[in-house]
Image: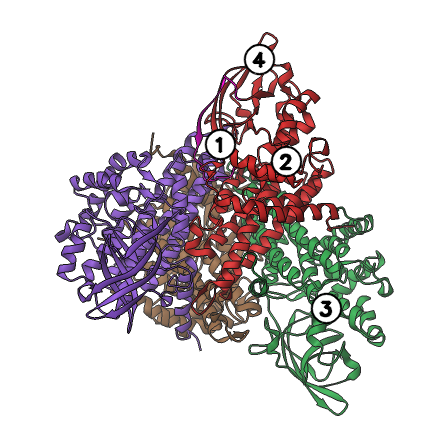
Chain colours: A purple, B brown, C green, D red
Amino acid sequence: MIDLARGSRELALAERVRRFVREEVIPYETDPRVERHGPNDDLRREMQAKARAAGLLAPQVSMEFGGHGLNHRETATVFRAVGYSLLGPTALNCMAPDEGNMHLLEKAATPAQKDRYLRPLAAGEIRSAFFMTEPDGGAGSDPSMLATTAARDGDGWVLNGRKWLITGADGAGFGLVMARTEGGATLFLVPLPHPGVRTERVLDTIDRTMSGGHGVMALDNVRVTEADILGGLDQGFRYAQIRLAPARLTHCMRWWGAASRAHDIACDYARTRKAFGKTLIEHEGVGFMLAENEIDLKQAELMIDWCAYVLDQGDAGVAESSMAKVAVSEGLFRIADRCVQVLGGMGVTDDTPVHQIFRDLRAFRIYDGPTEVHRWSLANRIRKRPQTFE
Amino acid sequence: MIDLARGSRELALAERVRRFVREEVIPYETDPRVERHGPNDDLRREMQAKARAAGLLAPQVSMEFGGHGLNHRETATVFRAVGYSLLGPTALNCMAPDEGNMHLLEKAATPAQKDRYLRPLAAGEIRSAFFMTEPDGGAGSDPSMLATTAARDGDGWVLNGRKWLITGADGAGFGLVMARTEGGATLFLVPLPHPGVRTERVLDTIDRTMSGGHGVMALDNVRVTEADILGGLDQGFRYAQIRLAPARLTHCMRWWGAASRAHDIACDYARTRKAFGKTLIEHEGVGFMLAENEIDLKQAELMIDWCAYVLDQGDAGVAESSMAKVAVSEGLFRIADRCVQVLGGMGVTDDTPVHQIFRDLRAFRIYDGPTEVHRWSLANRIRKRPQTFE
Amino acid sequence: MIDLARGSRELALAERVRRFVREEVIPYETDPRVERHGPNDDLRREMQAKARAAGLLAPQVSMEFGGHGLNHRETATVFRAVGYSLLGPTALNCMAPDEGNMHLLEKAATPAQKDRYLRPLAAGEIRSAFFMTEPDGGAGSDPSMLATTAARDGDGWVLNGRKWLITGADGAGFGLVMARTEGGATLFLVPLPHPGVRTERVLDTIDRTMSGGHGVMALDNVRVTEADILGGLDQGFRYAQIRLAPARLTHCMRWWGAASRAHDIACDYARTRKAFGKTLIEHEGVGFMLAENEIDLKQAELMIDWCAYVLDQGDAGVAESSMAKVAVSEGLFRIADRCVQVLGGMGVTDDTPVHQIFRDLRAFRIYDGPTEVHRWSLANRIRKRPQTFE
Amino acid sequence: MIDLARGSRELALAERVRRFVREEVIPYETDPRVERHGPNDDLRREMQAKARAAGLLAPQVSMEFGGHGLNHRETATVFRAVGYSLLGPTALNCMAPDEGNMHLLEKAATPAQKDRYLRPLAAGEIRSAFFMTEPDGGAGSDPSMLATTAARDGDGWVLNGRKWLITGADGAGFGLVMARTEGGATLFLVPLPHPGVRTERVLDTIDRTMSGGHGVMALDNVRVTEADILGGLDQGFRYAQIRLAPARLTHCMRWWGAASRAHDIACDYARTRKAFGKTLIEHEGVGFMLAENEIDLKQAELMIDWCAYVLDQGDAGVAESSMAKVAVSEGLFRIADRCVQVLGGMGVTDDTPVHQIFRDLRAFRIYDGPTEVHRWSLANRIRKRPQTFE
């Protein structure tokens, strides 16, 4: 039987999160420590201390590492509440890339690796980064173009290459580095700061919510050993898959919250601001946009829940998360775009968070695979299916 | 806990329906008895006899009346399979307006009314019609403009008025007539044919799947009595509400099936037809359209399931069915439109059912309330909500 | 200097056409001789007799053949007025494929061919067809897949093959047949009826405005000679190019007129029909759609004028007509779709011509190259351009 | 006759501008003097000195004030070239609001006002501002809500009120202030800086190309006299109309140039960047977006030229400029959005100007009247038209 009800545990937790975000996190949104690339580490620590005190830090991780051990569907309910402020995911320590890295480490790390990296990460003591994408000519939407190398050197490897758009790398406590090895690609854990890992620069980007921003990173003869391999030699892409679908989906969850915030602000504005003799919302031109927002929010919520359900069944969810990512990122962007429009002149200023939500959601249509790459991969699946009618 | 699994009963039934539609119904699609306004009654009876033999007739109604007693969510699963052929709903006796009328009669009719009208309707012995919409100046999207009158006359009433776009009225065994009474509006059951009820003409419309077509009907001094009232005097709109949301939603379910059929045909074509040195689906321009179709199908399915779940909780589901109706009708139309485009010249011919599915889905965006009316009513709800932030 | 004024000659002619269409042609729209595939030849002749009497028959052809010798830009002004009724182009003898064939014959035919084919065609004595597209596996969007053959046989050729979606072939006085010859492809003039040319069937299609409908044609050992070649041996594709861009563009012109008609009807309806206490047009949800229509109409008009200007400069206008065809067909379809929606239930019936205009415009997005093929060819041009910045 | 050719004078001037922008202006785009709110005055003066030397400063104004005396159509050709860099309009002194103010002063100012304000403005010695929009509750899309007052005081008036989103006000040499007078609204010229005019703050906005940014301004007992009135007492809205349509349209022209730049950058990228074994542009998913860009660019260009033509005929062009503004702003935004998408990760960084162009174009859909306000006013015009058919 189809049961769409939510469990009481997740509902109670989401309610606590909702209150926490509204009372504790939203006031920080105008804090000057939200810098050009996102909240700085001082602000991050201050917010996380409050979340820790409230028992809400990294709610998704297992209890062993301080969380609530949520499954994907429960995570969806909770993260939508977290995302209501763009600072929420940082405050609750469930922002990308850390949240995805925690997930991967829980699944694939050795006990020693968990102790060294996962424990402090889940506790908010350090941040982390995932060194995957590379500058022009290297790995991007097409990971097979991976150019960073891990060359055998005695009992270890030496990493060399350049990485690009590496979220949170600047200031991170460790990095997960994807590099080409003889038999494929391998993920290496590299503690940071490291003499061989240099931030060339931090990119100025349209979003402003990820601590450390997006760095261009140079890897210069970085020595690693067998113990630094995550998962297995030459198994990098396979292990990246573990992270892939869930990380895509948590982006959907968090940004759903942000879009719902923009919508609430636009509704509030439309109910009070007047033009041509009536409130904006009494103008169908505005009211219809808000109605469409509610439909898009609902559709996005359902796509997230459905994909989370698939992941909870143990499925890798590659196609499902592609479908969800396209539908949700495009849908949430439409919402944010309409909210800007409803707010009029106010919408293009920083006087409300809508402007920044709009910018973040523009980036979301590209992060974790642009819409077009997902369509391409979905089309490939259709191509390989048998005919329905002869 | 969110549980998106489907029950084994509905899955088994849907599978039987799927096979029945494919083996027994689809072959009738090119039967000449599919006339200008839809399948004629001879064809309808022939198909329904097969469905009866297969135990699949009117599967949604309660067992007492020969069905399987499905709840809304189970109905969704089954009707999506029924709709795979545009003739499926007629063959299985779950097409509009009969299906909605059965639902309403089950909820609101007296035992005598059930015996007289519901029993033969569920058995496929007769068809029915819902006399609601009126010509220009009368009830349409705005039911408050109802112009048909029921004037007190002794112990009964006399109905007078004109109705327009009355699906299935021509050839129906009875009609449910909405008419203005002193204290509001009332629904009357009128046996057909009736000397006072005349088909002025049957409209030529873009769709072609409803037996009897859409009639312009004249009501000329039609006498009715207390026993002919459905539900209660002056309670017409209240009882129409019972029918409203479920009927909207079953439209979504059936046409979902039709859109999925169009998509299957387009995929088959794209996998085999070649242009510019490769199959169509290898062209991203085509493949992306098919990928978008799958996303739209999934979103529509989820919206249907969600709204059905709400109805199963006993909620009237007015807002939810408005949201579902807009999202699903617009989404399915996009799918059909893309399928036509993928098929190219073939797509605008009757050589595949896609052409007719496209046409039906164009009408769906208007039937049961045009998209704009639903947006308007959703906007009204937003207008009345309290502010989120002061 | 940019001068967007129109000449007085074309304006006067367009005004005469406008009046003629409104007074003489529109009344025929409900004539039963508009059959399933379009106006039959009896109706066509009756309407053309009136146009001839009014001095408006085939206004685009040179004076030598009875027209007004309009250039492309003048043709645009006049044809937009012609298209105001879907029967207008037939009535004025400037419908596809005849109009394109006249254009091609004027440019490429020998004096003898002109006398035999162009003269009676321009006079409305006969119709014609262009035998280009083929069933699956043959020429469609990709003309290089041409499968019909012209095999050398003595001093002539023997044509064999099957053609598909051949507009007006059934009942035509001659056909222009594209067939594969040793050194390429060649266009042959074939008088019809002809014992070797058989109408397998006339397709049922979504449109209903082209006399003769769209036929599936079998060519069975059709003997032709040197004198039947149009243009030159192996030069078929080159000569088809002469027809290509102008024929695409006249489609845009004619259907622009149809869309403007739908818009006028929708505006009339919205100004008078009431719902929820005011006229439809006072509802922004409706008014905005009509405002968008006007913008789309203006954009389509400008694209047509611009492309016509390019053709008048002697340019082949291949890219320009691709751009115009995509923009105009997609834009006009949006207009027709909105008009259906504004009309609500009325919009999906044959009670107004909007329903049929909507259907014709759906086909237009596929005829003369689906949108996707034009995008593909435009993308190819961009690909070959030099870089702007190094 | 429709003549779409451009004059040699405008073509030659546009070519000079194109070269100037490419060689002299684009290099400044990464100059640190492009600050948070746009180019600072130091950078502005440096660029304008170069434009002056090249004879390209304020090309649109009459020769008397140092320009080339272009009509609207010529201005369109030239400004599209100017806008190729977001700094171009500032460098050539034809950016909003100065350019619109110059236009208005040329039409409406007294000789003394021209000498005092227009001459130094056209020469780039000062900047200016148009004090129209007000905070919540005041004039915005609906100018009738004007709250700033000009109270009679002896032989003059005293201005009081708050203005909001006043572009360039901070640092301007004078302002045009709209205030409510007894018989309507009046425009006053106020020299700046002025003790009664205070910049409360400069808003942080999504755009970054207007010197001085967008200010929140307080007017506190600002005394003005008869000589400070522009046009006439109580004639403020009438004179604002003079500025309205042309200013809207020059926005379209300049931002057209910006969109064309984004498109060139995206094309360059797509022709070289590889993914999945071929260049991006060989992927139809990318190539189609670029093809759509070219169509949208052409449509926008034609709408601009058409509206400019209307203005050149002496028409106020209110409806035409509404149509153009909607079509062009929405079209150019789609282009910028696609360019961001084509560039992928690169597109959301400041490494190319595309990111900033995207942001500016988002604002454009709101500046000078949001799309919805224009649709509303166009719908009103349709409402008032007579019926086409009775």
Q: Secondary structure at mark 4?
A: strand
Q: CA distance from mark 1 to mark 2?
A: 21 Å
Q: Chain of mark 3?
A: C
For discs 2 and 4, the disc positioned in front in the rendered view? 4
Residue D341: horizontal and vertical position, in percent? 46, 55
Q: Are marks 1 and 3 on the same chain?
A: no
Q: Chain of mark 4?
A: D
Residue assigned mark 1: D214
Proximity of marks 1 and 3: CB atoms separated by less than 8 Å: no
Q: Residue at x 47, y 51 (%)?
A: D352
Proximity of marks 2 and 4: CB atoms separated by less than 8 Å: no
Q: Are marks 3 and 4 on the same chain?
A: no
The residues colored magenta run D193-213
Q: Which mark is residue C253?
A: none
Q: Residue at x 75, y 88 (%)?
A: C156
Q: Secondary structure at mark 2?
A: helix
For discs 1 and 4, the disc positioned in front in the rendered view? 1
Classify 10 Å Cα crowding around label 2: few (below 14), some (14-19), many (20 and above). many
Residue assigned mark 3: C242
Q: Secondary structure at mark 3?
A: helix
Q: CA distance from mark 2 to mark 3?
A: 42 Å
For discs 3 and 4, the disc positioned in front in the rendered view? 4
Q: CA distance from mark 2 to mark 4?
A: 29 Å
Task: Find out whether residue B71 is within the magenta segment.
Answer: no
For discs 1 and 3, the disc positioned in front in the rendered view? 1
- Residue B177 vs residue D182, the one in the foreground: D182
Question: Who comes first in sequence, dot 2 or dot 4?
Answer: 4
Classify 10 Å Cα crowding around label 4: few (below 14), some (14-19), many (20 and above). many
Callout 1, which amino acid?
His
